[in-house]
Image (cartoon, helix red, strand yellow):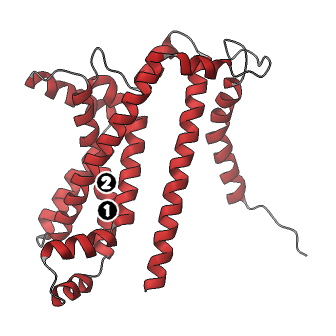
């Protein structure tokens, strides 16, 4: 039996994975330490998780962050899906290309520039900074992500399916709800999960547009980190990492089932 040889590509991939995940596991490791700082592991303890669940301010911020992420992802998915359908339906290639360029500008622009722009915009309008300013900003920068996730699925959807639905007497709404939407559901779900992840992780834009009395996890963690490393943050980060893994697993299972069904129907 020939021996397996590790190629340079595999070694490089292993090094990348180590660099990416080692700091995360280092953080998780110290979340179970009974000490107060990351200056040495003491004995195993759940004390920081107990302190986290007794911290009413942190729990409130976690709930604010989750509600904000879910709302912004849902709104961005609705608007982004409609935008992808509109772009795909354009007959003028020049207009379609220009709109795609405008859509991609937010993806390549630095978060600091986007956050400062929203701050200036809200200040000019006299809009009070808080939950709603953060929500509108998250929806705005999530829409281009959803468009890029949904548009390829819309392009792959055969036009013959809609034509067949019309031939069978379906109305425009019936063709849209029973043919178009089911055909691009995996793209919509991908866009939703990406928007949800971006909203949960965002710091730069949120830092600019949040106001007194409202905070998100990223801003709160940054504020506490400036005062010194608190292992309660390690415990919170561990829980958020596990939640992210669960979300990725759910999306993976969903996309796998959708792909299998698509292959069976072809």
Q: Residues within 10 Å of mark 1 (few under 14, many from 20)?
A: many
x then y, percent, for residue 253 = 53, 62
Horizontal and vertical percent for residue 198? Answer: 39, 41
Q: Nearer the viewer, residue 53 or 77?
A: 53
- Visible residue check, residue 77: yes
Q: Secondary structure at mark 2?
A: helix
In this picture, residue 15 sits left or right of residue 183 = right
Q: Residue at x 65, y 47 (%)?
A: 17
Q: Residue furthest left?
A: 125
| 43 with respect to 151 (left or right) | right
Q: Position of residue 85 (x, y in %)?
A: 21, 65
Instruction: State which quarter of the image contains the C terminus.
Output: bottom left
Disc ID at residue 158: none
Identified at 33% across, 24% down, the residue is 207
Residue position for label 1: 150
Please determine whether, in this image, residue 58 is positioned above or below residue 106. Answer: above
Q: Are marks 2 and 1 in contact (CB under 8 Å)?
A: yes
Q: What separation in Å lies between label 2 and label 1 (alpha carbons)?
A: 6 Å
Quadrant containing the N terminus is bottom right
Q: Secondary structure at mark 1?
A: helix
Q: Which labelled disc corresponds to residue 146?
A: 2
Classify 10 Å Cα crowding around label 2: few (below 14), some (14-19), many (20 and above).
many
Q: Residue at x 20, y 69 (%)?
A: 88
Q: Is residue 73 left or right of residue 14?
A: left
Q: Residue at x 64, y 19 (%)?
A: 48
Q: Nearer the viewer, residue 161 or 138?
A: 161
Give the x, y percent position of residue 192: 36, 52
- Residue 222 visible in rendering: no
Please tell me whether residue 253 is drawn above or below residue 167 in the rendered image.
Answer: above
- Which image quarter: residue 196? top left
């Amino acid at each position: 039996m020939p021996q397996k040889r590790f190629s340079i590509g595999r070694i490089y991939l292993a090094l990348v994975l180590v660099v990416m995940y080692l700091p995360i596991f280092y953080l998780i490791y110290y979340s179970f330490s009974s000490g107060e700082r990351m200056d040495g592991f003491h004995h195993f303890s759940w004390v920081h998780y107990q302190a986290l669940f007794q911290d009413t301010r942190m729990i409130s911020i976690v709930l604010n962050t989750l509600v904000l992420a879910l709302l912004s992802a849902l709104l961005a998915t609705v608007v982004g899906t409609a935008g992808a359908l509109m772009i795909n339906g354009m007959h003028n290639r020049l207009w379609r290309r220009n709109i795609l360029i405008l859509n991609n500008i937010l993806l390549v622009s630095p978060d600091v520039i986007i956050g400062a722009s929203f701050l200036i915009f809200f200040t000019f309008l006299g809009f009070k900074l808080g939950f709603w300013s953060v929500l509108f900003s998250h929806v705005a920068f999530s829409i281009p992500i959803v468009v890029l996730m949904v548009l390829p699925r819309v392009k792959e959807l055969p036009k013959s399916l809609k034509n067949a639905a019309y031939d069978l007497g379906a109305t425009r709404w019936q063709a849209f709800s029973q043919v178009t939407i089911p055909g691009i559901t995996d793209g919509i779900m991908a866009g939703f999960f990406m928007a949800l992840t971006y909203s949960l992780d965002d710091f730069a834009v949120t830092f600019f547009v949040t106001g007194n009395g409202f905070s998100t996890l990223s801003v709160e963690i940054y504020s506490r980190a400036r005062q010194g490393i608190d292992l309660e943050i390690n415990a919170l980060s561990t829980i958020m990492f596990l939640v992210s893994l669960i979300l990725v697993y759910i999306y993976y299972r969903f996309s796998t089932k959708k792909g299998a069904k698509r292959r069976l129907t072809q």
